[in-house]
Image (cartoon, helix red, strand yellow):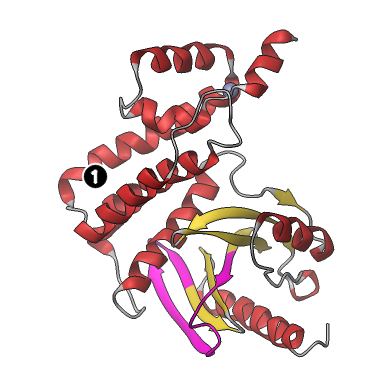
C-alpha cells in the first residue's frame, strides 16, 4: 500500500521529542501531526513520550539539574545535526540526543531525591545515571531493548562490530542460567556503546560495554542501588563494563563473575 511505503520512509519518531517540546516549526509540526494520524507505530511512540514528558514536568519542581548535566545535555543536542524528515537514518543522532536529554531529565526528576550511591562521586555518578536511563528507556519504549535478537554470540558480535569502532566481547551464558537475548547499540557517556541483553528468572539484564582509556588497569566491581535497580561497574582488558538489572545484588554479582571470567579467558586466547 502506498501509504505504508510512505510511512516506512518517513517515520517521525525522531521528531516527537522536539514536537512535544514545541521546538518544531509550524510546518514541520503539521507534517508530524499528519504522519501521526496515519501511522500507528509513531503514534504509540508519541503516547509513550508524552507520558514520560508529563512525568518529567510533574517532577520538575522538585529538583534543579546541576549545571554540568545541563551543559552535557545541551552539548549533545547541539552536536546532533538538524535532520530532514525524509532521512530517518541520518537523523538517528538527533533522536538519540533528544531521547537522552528526555531520559536524563526523567531519571533526575524521579530519582534525585532517593538516590543512594556507593560508586565513587563525580563523573561516574553521571555515567551511572546515563546507564540507568538507557536501561529504563529500553524497557519503556517499544522495540528499544534489542536491535539484533539472537542467543548466538557469532551473530551478535559481528553485528555489533559493524556498528561500532571497537569489538566488545560477547558470550552466551545459557548453561549458567543467563541466556543471551541479543544486543543493541546505544548512546551513553557521549559515545556509542554496545549493550548485551540477558535474561535471568524473567529479569532483564543490560550489560553495557565500551573502551575505556583507564580500562587497561583492572578495577574491581563497584555497586550502586537506585530505584530498585542494581548496577555493577568494573574495568577489565581496556573496556568499561556496566551491568544493570532489577535482579538482586547476589544474582547480578554472579552474572558479573561469569562475564569477567569469560572476558579473561578471551583475553588469554582460550576461547
Ligand atoms: Zn511512522
Vertical position of residue 84 compared to residue 210: above or below? above
Residue 156 on image: x %, y %: 76, 59
Left or right relative to 237: residue 99:
left
Instruction: Please report the bounds of the magenta region as a residue range.
Output: 207-231
Vertical position of residue 225 compared to residue 94: above or below? below
Image quadrant in which the C terminus is located:
bottom right
Residue 124 on image: x %, y %: 37, 73
Asked if residue 210 is among those painted magenta in the image, a careful observer would answer yes
Q: Secondary structure at mark 1?
A: helix
- Label count reads 1
Left or right relative to 207: residue 128:
left
Is residue 66 at all visible to an observer of this figure?
A: no
Vertical position of residue 101 compared to residue 43: above or below? below
Viewer-nearest residue: 191 or 112: 191
Q: Quadrant of ligand 1?
A: top right
Label 1 neighbourhood size at 10 Å, few (<14), some (14-19), many (20+)? some
Viewer-nearest residue: 244 or 189: 189
Image quadrant in which the N terminus is located:
top right
- Residue under label 1, please give it: 59
Q: Is mark 1 within 8 Å of ligand 1?
A: no
Viewer-nearest residue: 254 or 144: 144
Left or right relative to 173: residue 242:
left
Q: Residue at position x 50%, y 33% from top?
A: 14
Residue 121 on image: x %, y %: 29, 77
Amino acid at each position: 500500500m502506498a501509504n505504508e511505503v510512505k510511512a516506512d520512509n518517513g517515520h517521525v519518531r525522531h521528531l516527537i521529542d522536539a514536537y512535544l517540546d514545541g521546538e518544531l516549526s509550524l510546518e514541520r509540526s503539521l507534517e508530524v501531526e499528519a504522519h501521526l494520524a496515519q501511522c500507528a507505530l509513531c503514534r504509540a511512540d508519541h503516547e509513550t513520550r508524552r507520558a514520560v514528558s508529563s512525568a518529567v514536568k510533574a517532577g520538575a519542581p522538585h529538583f534543579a539539574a546541576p549545571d554540568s548535566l545541563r551543559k552535557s545535555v545541551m552539548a549533545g543536542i547541539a552536536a546532533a545535526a538538524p535532520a530532514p524528515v525524509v532521512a530517518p537514518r541520518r537523523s538517528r543522532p538527533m533522536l538519540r540526543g533528544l531521547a537522552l536529554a528526555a531520559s536524563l531529565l526523567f531519571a533526575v526528576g524521579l530519582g534525585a531525591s532517593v538516590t543512594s550511591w556507593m560508586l565513587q562521586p563525580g563523573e561516574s555518578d553521571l555515567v551511572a545515571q546515563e546507564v540507568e536511563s538507557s536501561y529504563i528507556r529500553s524497557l519503556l519504549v517499544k522495540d528499544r531493548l534489542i536491535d539484533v535478537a539472537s542467543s548466538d554470540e557469532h551473530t551478535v558480535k559481528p553485528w555489533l562490530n559493524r556498528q561500532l569502532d571497537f569489538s566488545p566481547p560477547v558470550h552466551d551464558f545459557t548453561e549458567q542460567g543467563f541466556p543471551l537475548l541479543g544486543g543493541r547499540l546505544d548512546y551513553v557517556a557521549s559515545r556509542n556503546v554496545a549493550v548485551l541483553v540477558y535474561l535471568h528468572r524473567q529479569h532483564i539484564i543490560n550489560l553495557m560495554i565500551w573502551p575505556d582509556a583507564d580500562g587497561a588497569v583492572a578495577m574491581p566491581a563497584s555497586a550502586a542501588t537506585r530505584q530498585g535497580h542494581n548496577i555493577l561497574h568494573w574495568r577489565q582488558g581496556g573496556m568499561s563494563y556496566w551491568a544493570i538489572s532489577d535482579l538482586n545484588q547476589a544474582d547480578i554479582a554472579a552474572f558479573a563473575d561469569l562475564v569477567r571470567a569469560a572476558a579473561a579467558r578471551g583475553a588469554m586466547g582460550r576461547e
